[in-house]
Image (spheres, rainbow, N blue to C red):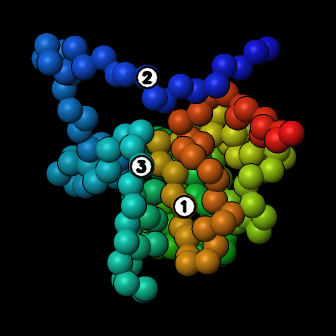
Amino acid sequence: MLIEPSRSWRSIDLGPILSGQWSPPQPAVGARRDGIGLFYPRKMHSVASESEAGKTWLAISTAYHELRQGNSVLYIDFEDDENGIVGRLLTFHTPHEWIRERFHYKRPTQSVNTEINLADLYETVEQHNPTLAVIDDQTGRTTMRPRGNFLRRRRPPLPPRRHQ
């Protein structure tokens, strides 16, 4: 199978926007009680604040709301461990079945930028199609994160170029 390289420098057709056929996305991920979402579907978001300000609690709360809607969640954790994260989910009275079936927890100790690690990550994304992916990171561990937007890819990445 021949995989064509991505061509991100091509011009984008702006006609649908100018003709009124396009409507702006609505925040739908992590919906509050009033139905208004906190995050936009299929967009990348960053939550930043001082240490111990509640970023992980926000992520867990959003994960709970996605699970409550019947969606899957991918949680990549560089800060805590499975006991801490599942313990937080349980404080929301999250049913064990939801966690077991739709909460996909990873606590990597190696870079994702290897063929086997990328395959494991792609497998989770392809099989479960999470509506929320959390990368709970701490300073200094960012070298283990994937290059590019791996959640939007639907095919394996191109092999690295060999320099001659």
**In terms of sequence position, does the residue under pointer 1 or pointer 2 come before the other?**
2
Q: Is residue 59 visible?
A: yes
Choose top left, top right, bottom left or bottom right for residue 4.
Answer: top right
Question: How far is mark 1 from mark 2, CA to CA?
Answer: 30 Å
User: What amino acid is labelled 2 in the image?
Assistant: Arg
Mark 1 or mark 2, whichever is nearer to me: 2
Find disc 2 in the rendering and name its residue.
10
Residue at 72 percent across and 38 percent down: it is: 123
Q: Nearer the viewer, residue 32 or 113?
A: 113
Choose top left, top right, bottom left or bottom right for residue 15.
Answer: top left
| Percent x, y of residue 98 | 56, 51
User: What amino acid is labelled 1 in the image?
Assistant: Ile
Mark 3 or mark 2, whichever is nearer to me: 2
Task: Tell me the crowding category of disc 3: few under 14, some 14 to 19, or many 20 or more residues within 10 angstroms, Cα based.
Answer: few
Q: Is residue 12 above or below residue 120?
A: above
Whether residues under marks 1 and 3 lie with C-beta atoms below 8 angstroms apart, the answer is no
Viewed as shown, does residue 41 lie left or right of 130? left
Q: Nearer the viewer, residue 63 or 137?
A: 137
Find disc 1 in the rendering and name its residue.
135
Viewed as shown, does residue 54 lie left or right of 159? left
Residue at 45 percent across and 29 percent down: it is: 9
| Percent x, y of residue 42 | 41, 39
Viewed as shown, does residue 48 lie left or right of 98? left
Q: Secondary structure at mark 2?
A: loop
**In terms of sequence position, does the residue under pointer 1 or pointer 3 come before the other?**
3
Q: Secondary structure at mark 3?
A: loop
Question: How far is mark 1 from mark 3, CA to CA?
Answer: 11 Å
Q: Secondary structure at mark 1?
A: strand
